[in-house]
Amino acid sequence: MPDSTALVPMCEIVKPLTLLDLCRICGSSADWVIELVDEGILDPQGEGRAVWRFESTSITIVHKVQRLQRDLRLNMPGVAVVLSLADENAALKRRLQMLENDPRYAIWMHGPDDPAS
């Protein structure tokens, strides 16, 4: 569901973002974003805060963190765990979907009209 309060539509941002850009777009403080980096939730490119560059997908991650903290009142380590488990769950679902669509792993079930049943 799109966020109607977003300052910039996320699909339009393709260039890497500075720390200041990310803070402005998400309405967050630099200290809070730095805490996300320290916790391993965000992974900017570059050595040192002055040259950090964030992918545009960081905006989505920041919005998820904001919702988790607002709605569930999670602290930063709790948010990191939830996001990690959500990523793992999504990867497992993708793997399961791939296996379900692969005929090599198909399980043939006999129907009620099948003489082998």
Image (cartoon, helix red, strand yellow):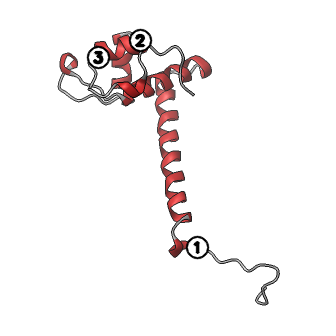
Q: How many neighbours does mark 1 have within 10 angstroms: few (below 14), some (14-19), or many (20 or more)?
A: few
Q: Which quarter of the rendered picture does the N terminus lie within?
A: top right
**Horizontal side of residue 71 vs 84, given as left or right:** right
Q: Nearer the viewer, mark 1 or mark 3?
A: 1
Q: Which quarter of the rendered picture does the C terminus lie within?
A: bottom right
- Mark 1 / mark 3, whichever is N-terminal: 3
User: Given the image, on which type of amino acid does mark 3 rest?
Assistant: Leu
Task: Give the vertical position of 21 relative to 108 (above or below).
Answer: above
What secondary structure is found at the residue carrying circle 3? helix
Q: How many marks?
A: 3
Q: Residue furthest right?
A: 112
Q: Which residue is mark 2?
A: 28
**Horizontal side of residue 59 vs 100, given as left or right:** left
User: Given the image, on which type of amino acid does mark 1 rest?
Assistant: Ala
Residue 15: percent from the left, percent from the top? 27, 26
User: Toward the viewer: 66 or 75?
Assistant: 66
What secondary structure is found at the residue carrying circle 1? loop
- Mark 3 / mark 2, whichever is N-terminal: 3
Q: How many neighbours does mark 3 have within 10 angstroms: few (below 14), some (14-19), or many (20 or more)?
A: some
Q: Which residue is mark 1?
A: 106
User: Toward the viewer: 2 or 72?
Assistant: 2
For residue 91, which numbered disc appears in the image?
none
Q: State the residue at coordinates (36%, 17%).
A: 33
Q: How far is disc 3 from disc 2 in space, using C-alphas?
A: 10 Å
**Horizontal side of residue 100 vs 34, given as left or right:** right
Task: Give the vertical position of 16 relative to 87 (above or below).
Answer: above
Q: State the residue at coordinates (36%, 10%).
A: 24
Residue 81: percent from the left, percent from the top? 49, 34
Q: Which residue is mark 3?
A: 19
